[in-house]
Amino acid sequence: MMIDLKKLAAVPSPPPVRSAAVERGIADSVAYLGSEAAQRSLELDPYWPKWNSPWWHMLLLYELGEARQIPVRTSAAMAAGIDRLLHLFPIHPSDAPGADLQRDSACHCALGSMDPVLAACGIDVERTLPWVRPWFVRYQMADGGLNCDNTAYLQTGECPSSMVGTVAPLEAMLLGGAGTSEQRDFVARAAGFLIDRALIHGSQTVHNAEERGAAVAWRALTFPRFYFYDVLRGLAVLVRWAEATGQLLPEAAVATVVNALVERWPDGVVHVERQAHARSTTILPTTDRSPSPRAPTSTFPLLDATSRLGEPSEALTRQWTEARGGLLRLAHAGRLAVGSTSKSSR
């Protein structure tokens, strides 16, 4: 399949539109992040509970392009909270004896999501958290992907990588600049992983069979992303990768997604089609380090305002506009490569 470049170029680029509810939600989140309640939450745990702790307010403000409004002391407290976590991803019981793996360890998609947020807040991530970007290199699997399921790394005879576990680290590493040779190799291999999956295919492994069912939902665009995956997020990062590195982007790897998005959003305005954060539970951190109970998640006004099904999304519309522009630049430069993708991951 090839991209219909005429149709792609004909899609208008609408100006961003932000509702009054979103504006109020931004003000509410900024006020919360500047509060003592937010500081206490960060002291207790940098990540939990979902979806209403500083972590999620910060991520959503970043996705809306409003990271500059995050208070300096809050971003500094977040960096300090992350640095208190284990600087490794426990795979074997002997890796972190006595640790609470839910509270004491980060995962790939969490670190990949927060790294760009902290950078946008003015924090030098490589100096403040020098272990984070080498982490992504360390836990990259043979096919270029990662998986936030610790047990995936114990499997033999197959490589159960995860799209969700890979896309955020790739985004973070692209924003990190040229980096070391190991980091550049990580970026090339992670991009190859998304290309092999053509942005739409779930894992064909036994261990990660659940992802094949999840992949059906990826074509429905979600906001906020947090750490979730959809095909526009995958497309955007591959376009950015090709432009940043000078590599060819295989047309066959993105054509199905691009043509579908052109047909679905002919006026260029993208609407929320899925609430990936819905119907989940969270742990509730305790001050005495006793076992953390699980409970239903809670939301906050900005999350509610930006995730309404069927509503236009300023952030998704902007990302689709930027991806179209990048694709057209690549096509003009002769860097959309004709040919099939590898099937090593499928």
Image: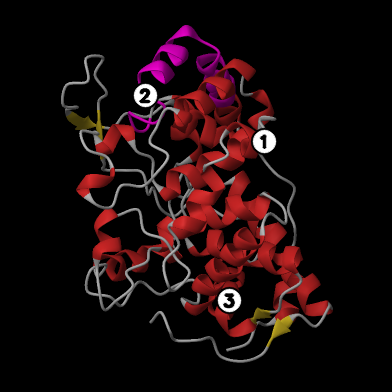
Q: Residues within 10 Å of mark 1 (few under 14, many from 20)?
A: some
Span colored in magenta: 25-51
Percent of width and height locating residue 31: 55, 14
Indicate whether 131 appears above or below 329.
Answer: above
Q: Secondary structure at mark 2?
A: loop
Check if residue 39 falls in the magenta segment.
yes
**Residue 163 visible to an observer of this rendering:** yes
Q: Nearer the viewer, mark 3 or mark 2?
A: 2
Q: Which residue is mark 1?
A: 120
The amino acid on which the numbered mark 3 sits, given as a three-letter code, is: Val
Check if residue 258 falls in the magenta segment.
no
Q: Contact (CB < 8 A) between labels 1 and 3?
A: no
Percent of width and height locating residue 174: 65, 55
In whole angstroms, how far apart are the C-alphas of marks 3 and 2?
Answer: 39 Å
Sequence order check: which comes first, mark 2 or mark 1? 2
Q: Which residue is mark 3?
A: 254
Nearer to us in this view, 253 or 300: 253
**Side (left or right) of 121 relative to 335:** left
Indicate whether 206 appears above or below 102.
Answer: below
Q: What's the residue at 21%, 14% (across, down)? A: 288
In whole angstroms, how far apart are the C-alphas of marks 1 and 3?
Answer: 28 Å
Sequence order check: which comes first, mark 3 or mark 2? 2
Indicate whether 261 appears above or below 39.
Answer: below
Nearer to us in this view, 139 or 102: 139
